Image: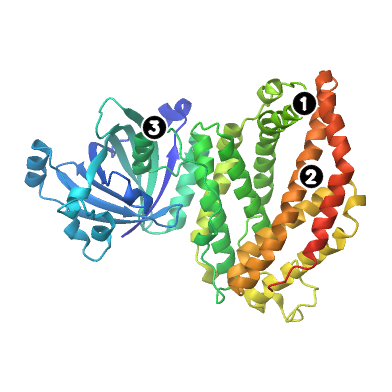
Amino acid sequence: MQEIELKFLVPEYRLDGLMRQTKVKSSLTSLLAAHYFDTPDQVLAANGMALRIRKEGDRWVQTLKSNGDGMASRGEQNNVLDSQMVAEALATDSLSPDLSLYDTLDITQLVASPDTRRTADALACQYITEVQRTTRLIKKDDSTIELAYDEGRVIHGEDSQISQPIHEIEFELIEGDVHFLFETAKTWCRRYNLCLSTVTKAERGGLLLAGKQHAEATKADLRQLAVHKKMSQPQFLRAVVHNCMIQILPNASAIADGSTDGAHVHQLRVGIRRLRTALRFFKDFSSQINPEWAPILKQTFSLLGDYRDRELLQTRTQPMLEKLGGPAVDWSEERAAIRIKPIDAVRANDFQITLLELIEYTMSPAKKDRPLIKHSGTGSKTKGAKKNPAKLSTQQATSELLEALYTKISQASDQFASLSTDAQHDVRKRLKSLRYVSEFTAALYKDKKSKAFLKYLEPAQEILGEYNDDIVGQYFYGQKAQQDPNAWFAVGYFSAQEVHAANQCAQSLKSIKDAPKFW
């Protein structure tokens, strides 16, 4: 069975109003006690699985959850157990899952240990959840959603004194139209400022065992990009957006939950940048792109960038300058003065609504979608360019885009050193776009050729990135020097580097002309 649900964090200041709408006459309140099983080295969790035995009313249910789409959908198998046998096992502290229920899966081999006589011996209760759940049904026509508000805690399996609170609300589609699920979630999100959360109870338990508040920042994972040559343009864009979202959502979730780790901010910005690139260059691949997404993503990206720039000044740029003999310059005041922090940018209602709409877009049927009439790359001499772009294969359409982008970068490479700072920044952004578009489309072409091309881009992107960091540093230290004379050392350093660094960038860009094109 595949469950489709959306999970949210609830701001404390909105809790009273939310509970008034949750605890209605028809609502039910129940206590859920769940025991989660895994190997000592968390083999199931590492494979995206969670195995629990949970008391649900008078029943004990064993559930195996597996990885779904990384956003709103997960596999789930439920089996009701013999309550008397469970009670006896609990009394003797010998409760263990029945793995015979999964004969068609590889669970047995996955958790088997050469040091144990039975497969089940390799599993132990790692953590327990105790939750008070309030549920109500929301119906419209033939569609039904279960709203569940959970409050409780996750408890360490070996030390009950170690625990973390659970405080979340879920919307699960029981039957009917998935669009109704998203429309309902957006209504509640607007009303109560809810924030999407990707952290399952099993993941909370894993974090508790590891002594962490939040998971590590999530990087882009192109191995999960499900693209193939026979895809239509609408199918292709959905797959690309999905790949961007599985990077964006966990990082946004961590920040909304209070993480101040700069790595979450950085990887969220990378994910948003990849998504903006996809929506810009493949915008004609689908007639169902909401034009309101782009400005909201741009605004969030910029707000996160303001914070990230000032953080890097303190954590990376200033230490580098001090190693060169520069004096101390304190950036803590500038960081503290930022009015909109990452948590504010991520919790913003328009950003959360946009995330919901993007998730829904990836789950929507591509068969009902059609490419637009014109591609942004049309006009190149790529084979097939004279055809109606909407009738081009996905490979033909992406070839046009790649050729147009590659040509612009090649032309700029000869004059990069003489360009204005803004124009140089545009070249750098195009280079990043070329990399992302190449990564998105690589599976449509021969693997070895696309990998070889991407290797040519890496040195140039690294050099241009360092050059941009120097430009940003020069600007901020120039501003700082008006109040702190110590900042003049950095201004002088960056000024001295500028001409040489610009020439290095120009040379690295020229090498891209020799890159073996894969399209």
Q: Measure how far apart labels 2 and 1 are at the Cα level.
A: 21 Å
**SS of the residue under disc 3:** loop
Residue 325: numbered disc: 1
Amino acid type indicated by mark 3? Gly
**Residue 361 x/y as whole percent:** 54, 58
Of mark 3 and mark 2, the one earlier in the sequence is: 3
Say which quarter of the image contains residue 347.
top right
- Position of 239 relative to 249 (above/below): below
Q: Amino acid at mark 2?
A: Tyr
Q: Secondary structure at mark 2?
A: helix
- The residue carrying mark 2 is 467
139 in relation to 350, above or below: below
Name the quarter where the C terminus is drawn.
bottom right
Relative placement, left or right, of 237 versus 62 is right
Q: Residue at x 74, y 68 (%)?
A: 515
Instruction: Give whichever of 247, 455 is nearer the camera.
Output: 455
Task: Write the residue at 52% across / 35% down.
Answer: 256
Foreground mark, 1 or 3?
1
- Quadrant in which the N terminus is drawn: bottom left
Q: Quadrant of residue 135?
A: top left
Q: Position of residue 428 (x, y in %)?
A: 77, 52
Separation of residues labelled 3 and 2 (CA atoms): 39 Å
